[in-house]
Amino acid sequence: MGKFMHDNRLLSQREVNIRHYSLAAVAVGLGLGVAGLCKALHSGLSIPWVYPRNLFLGSGRVYYVGGLRNLGNNCFLNVILQALASCDGFISFLDNLLATDGLLPEEKAVRMPLLLALSSLLEDLSIVRDERTVLNPHGVMHALNFYVSHFNLTRQQDASEAFLHLLISLRDEFSHCYVPHRSSLADITLSHSKVYKQREGNLPECKRWKKNLFGPFDGTIGSILSCRNCSSVLSLDFENFHCLPLSPVLNANGDITSGCSLVDCLKYFTVVEHLDNYRCDRCWHIIAAKFLSLKSEVDEEKVSKLNTCVDYDTCSCGDMFPMEEMPRSSSSRATKQLIISHCPKILCIHLLRASVSLDGEPIKHQGHISFPLILNLSPFVGGASSAGPLVMNVQRDGQQALHLYRQLNMQMSLNALPTGGHLSSQPCKEEATNNSGHSIHVANVDASSSSSSSPHPSMSKLYGLSAVVEHYGKCGGGHYAVYRRVASNPDPDDPGKPLAGLGRRWFYISDGNVSEVPEEDVLCAEATLLFYERL
């Protein structure tokens, strides 16, 4: 056909016969390939997006966790629901909200439809069954749509945005139903000297309010602006967050650097910025006080006022000087740094892969960003004076996390470990091995210098990986899937009843398709969202 079209001549009989033989060979090869694929699948080969891998637990029995039906481009919400189902702390939080007093059961059904629908669905997603199950998220979507009608849940959306909408909607719904034990929160906090007696079976009102309205994803970022000349803190601002946004480390071409890790992104987020030619009002007060002190007749009252002034931005200290005698301070050097001032119980990290090109077109930064199974957040909670101490803190606290993880590992039954005795592994990074030969993965750990006498890191800063959300395709489209941890095995006699304290297994879930995967696959995912739960 090609010769006929391009050379404008007919094919000879011999050439036609050759092409007939070629087509026949292609048909035979295709048939053999399909037959081989079917046999391979029948023999146990798993392709996650074609045929879900079976989960074999116990004595050859097959178990599954529930998938979620795609009701029309809602994969972005399905992955969030699956990730939340892997966070035990969030499920407990919902249970506590439902158990709060003040509303009758029939009133809760009317006034808290989202809370009830979400709690019921996550409970079903937490059950390990002996048959394939695809659950319907329609109840959650219907209830959520009441609060975010402008956010179309049946069109392609951003998963991180859907996550924030869900949390805010839950808080809005519960706050409208919250019944305080006293008349108002103003009465509770009006006087610090008052002592309120705790009602029988209930927390004090202020703690109860904080427990119910401050969720497990609530954290706080602090911004510190300091002067390097006078060592004063110029400003201290705080901002609440539900999802910590981290930018990947890019090279000169705008691509993710090779070997980029989550710890690198945290270092980049908390790095100290140096600001030159900054006008510091406290430095001016110091210079003005010295200027007056050098005069022949020292005005002690003015000097004292300058030294004791704290309202640098709004004070009238400059009015003490005539315009021609006004002291001029030299430019100061300032530093600015972001810190995590309050760590949430569940840490959601958004790796910002979406960006805009020089032409104004949306682009997505491709590339692997490595992340650990155990994350120690303590080096990034306090400010660091320079990059050097921050790196030292990461290395030191990584050793502490390794030591603690070893102790936790020793308490686990060896029978609960996955095949081969590996508690976790990371093919893309170096592995650290404990004294029992079990491989573990902790962020920035040098196993050669670890010591059993290392102090423990603060447990409030140590997090375990619960879920990983991955996005395929370009910005504004594509598909979401999730890797989800299941922290318990089913009871052989009752698949719907979990057994605590046994092994942890990972599932790859793409809407209704569910397959078990090893930790190596999880740790090599190109993550967009990471869910870590505090240990």
Image (cartoon, rainbow, N blue to C red):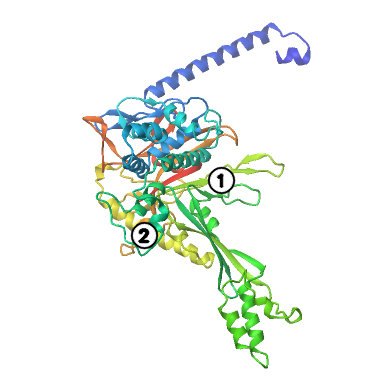
Query: Secondary structure under badge 2?
Result: loop
Q: Quadrant of the N terminus?
A: top right
Question: Does 469 sit left or right of 409 as displayed?
Answer: right
Task: Kindly report the distance in space between the C-alpha atoms of the residues bearing marks 1 and 2.
Answer: 28 Å
Location of residue 360 in the rendering, given as x and y in whole percent from the top left corner: 70, 41
Front-lying residue, 158 or 483: 158
Task: Find disc 1 in the rendering and name its residue.
Answer: 352
Looking at the picture, which amino acid does disc 2 mark? Ser
| Residue sitting at x 46%, y 30% | 141
Looking at the picture, which amino acid does disc 1 mark? Leu
Q: How many residues crowd around disc 2 within 10 Å: few (fewer than 14), some, or many (20 or more)?
A: some
**Residue sitting farthest toward the right:** 8
Rendered image: mark on residue 458: 2
Query: Secondary structure under badge 1?
Result: loop
Query: Can residue 502 be spotted in the picture?
Result: yes
Q: How many residues crowd around disc 1 within 10 Å: few (fewer than 14), some, or many (20 or more)?
A: some
**Residue sitting farthest toward the front:** 183
**Residue sitting farthest toward the top:** 13
Location of residue 329 in the rendering, given as x and y in whole percent from the top left corner: 68, 76
